[in-house]
Image (spheres, rainbow, N blue to C red):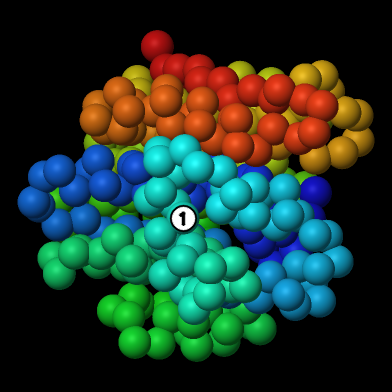
Amino acid sequence: MNYRHSFHAGNSADVVKHSLLIALVRALQHKQSALTLIDTHAGCGLYDLGGEQARRTGESMQGVMRAFADTNPLLNDYRVAVQAVNAGAEPMLYPGSPQILAQLLRPQDVLILNEKHPEDVQALRSAMRGTSAAVHERDAYELWLAMLPPRTPRGVVVVDPPYEQTDERARITVALAAACRKWAHGVTVIWYPLKDRAAHLRWKAQLRKIGIAKFLSVEHWLYDGDQPGIYNGAGLFIVNPPYAFTQALPPLLEALRAALAPEGHRGAITTDWLGD
């Protein structure tokens, strides 16, 4: 499955991913010690919702636009993050994870971004100009392991690949196992699309074998039943989520489900602990 960021900016998966990422980093920032935030597949950093690629799919209409039309205050932090890169009331630009993470930085925090695609990394450098972010152009999995453990006491690694390669899930599994050996208490967030349920369950079974004690899966299913052959939603694996984050999660997930459910469907956002 090819999931280039620019074609899907601001869709329902982005709304869930970025809402949870904001909540996760803010929960970690309850402590004053510095954080290193690492985005291994950073993309362009900023996306034009009126651009040709975004308009080709039109997915933002079922994502960020729904979130902005909703009135639930639990989505305010997400809306503020999107509004920060827009001048008007309606979003015309969409901030990727790099821009959102940059907004969350405190003076003591560090942001490291990586993007291998040559055109996208140039766009990323332009989008992040004026921030303190360090931008790399390396293989994502090599950088992931090379940066661990970070120099700061705590941190978060965000792994958000386009799933263009057939071995993407296998590479993630191997890299995650190695990352946990190098940085056992680190927080890792892995985004994935939901399409083939059987294949996804097999991947989950492989990930369980790594033996991570605190391993949370959050999955947003758009439709009330499987829609074969199409995008059914997306999820996040979160390694070592902080307690404050997991405690605040249920009402936030319900707010997201209600805001993003397609016409005629209730949808679902489920959580599952994969650890022992």
Query: Residue furthest toward the right?
Result: 229
Which residue is rendered at x = 34% and y = 87% of the image? 130
Are there few (<14), some (14-19), or many (20+) residues within 10 Å of tag 1? some
| Residue 206 in view here | no
Query: Residue furthest toward the left?
Result: 32
The vertical placement of 84 against 57, above or below, is below
The vertical placement of 103 against 67, above or below, is below
Q: Nearer the viewer, residue 17 or 38?
A: 17
Which residue is rendered at x = 59% and y = 30% of the image? 257
Q: Nearer the viewer, residue 64 or 210?
A: 64
SS for tag 1? helix
Which residue is rendered at x = 77% and y = 25% of the image? 265
Query: Residue furthest toward the top?
Result: 276
| Residue 100 in view here | yes
Q: How many marks?
A: 1
The amino acid beneath tag 1 is Arg
The vertical placement of 235 against 150, above or below, is above
**Residue 234's quadrant in the figure?**
top right
In the shown orientation, is residue 33 left or right of residue 2?
left
Residue under circle 1? 79
